[in-house]
């Protein structure tokens, strides 16, 4: 069986460094057989990839890419804590989308993260999910992704 590390390599995906917390929390915590990942923003090399509200300053297509980056950052937090190869399955993802008034496409935006989890983990990446529109996110980010995974 292919490991998740090998699967990432096959996909040409490299896990980034874990983003430093913005306040009084840690990127991820293990409790029993689950890892709970704090909300991850679309940081690339320590810099926020974009700011603004989806449906205004940020297009839904770009926001979907930022959700994927946020999902990748969530996987990096899992990897830093327990190693990506210990993941049994993705249990739940929560995506927050900073939404312009009248924007209702949050599910399509959060698909950026959900599709990433499916690419990496296959059937084990199928998960429960919430996609929530919010008025503001930290640092003006357009998206934020939380993750819960089961580990061995």
Image (spheres, grey):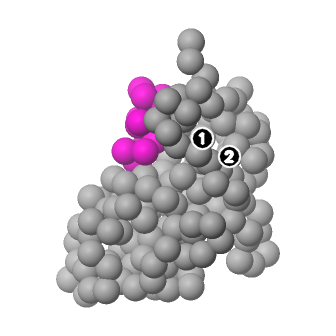
Which residue is rendered at x = 46% and y = 35% of the image? 11
User: Does residue 28 appear in this view?
Assistant: yes
Q: Quadrant of residue 30?
A: top right
In the picture, the quarter occupied by the N terminus is top right
Which residue is rendered at x = 27% and y = 75% of the image? 59
Which segment did they paint magenta? Answer: 114-129
Label 1 sits on residue: 149
Which residue is rendered at x = 56% and y = 85% of the image? 139
Rendered location of residue 106, percent (x, y): 30, 66
How packed mark 1 is, by other alpha carbons closer than 10 Å (few <14, some 14-19, many 20 or more), is: many
The secondary element bearing badge 2 is classed as helix
The secondary element bearing badge 1 is classed as strand
Comparing labels 1 and 2, the label whose residue is closer to the camera? 2
Does the magenta-highlighted stretch encompass residue 104?
no
In the picture, the quarter occupied by the C terminus is top right
Mark earlier in primary sequence (1, 2):
2
Which residue is rendered at x = 27% and y = 65% of the image? 61
Mark number for residue 20? none
Classify residue 117 as left or right of residue 86: left
Classify residue 46 as left or right of residue 2: right
Label 2 sits on residue: 78
Q: CA distance from mark 1 to mark 2?
A: 8 Å
Residue with the most extreme top position: 1
How packed mark 2 is, by other alpha carbons closer than 10 Å (few <14, some 14-19, many 20 or more), is: many
Dominant secondary structure of the residues highlighted in magenta in the image? helix
* Number of disc labels: 2
Does the magenta-highlighted stretch encompass residue 120?
yes
The front one of 136 and 49 is 49
In the displayed structure, 130 sits above or below 2; it is below
Q: Are marks 1 and 2 in contact (CB under 8 Å)?
A: yes
Classify residue 127 as left or right of residue 81: left
């Amino acid at each position: 069986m292919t490991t998740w590390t090998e699967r990432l390599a096959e996909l040409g995906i490299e896990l980034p460094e874990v983003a430093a917390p913005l306040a009084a929390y840690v990127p991820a915590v293990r409790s029993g057989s689950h890892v709970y990942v704090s909300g991850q923003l679309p940081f690339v090399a320590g810099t926020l990839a974009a700011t603004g509200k989806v449906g205004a300053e940020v297009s839904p297509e770009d926001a979907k890419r930022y959700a994927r980056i946020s999902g990748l950052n969530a996987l990096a937090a899992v990897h830093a804590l327990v190693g990506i190869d210990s993941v049994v399955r993705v249990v739940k993802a929560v995506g927050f989308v900073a939404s312009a008034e009248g924007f209702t496409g949050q599910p399509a935006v959060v698909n950026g993260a959900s599709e990433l989890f499916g690419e990496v983990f296959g059937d084990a990446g199928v998960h429960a999910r919430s996609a929530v529109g919010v008025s503001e996110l930290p640092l003006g980010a357009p998206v934020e992704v939380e993750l819960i995974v089961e580990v061995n």
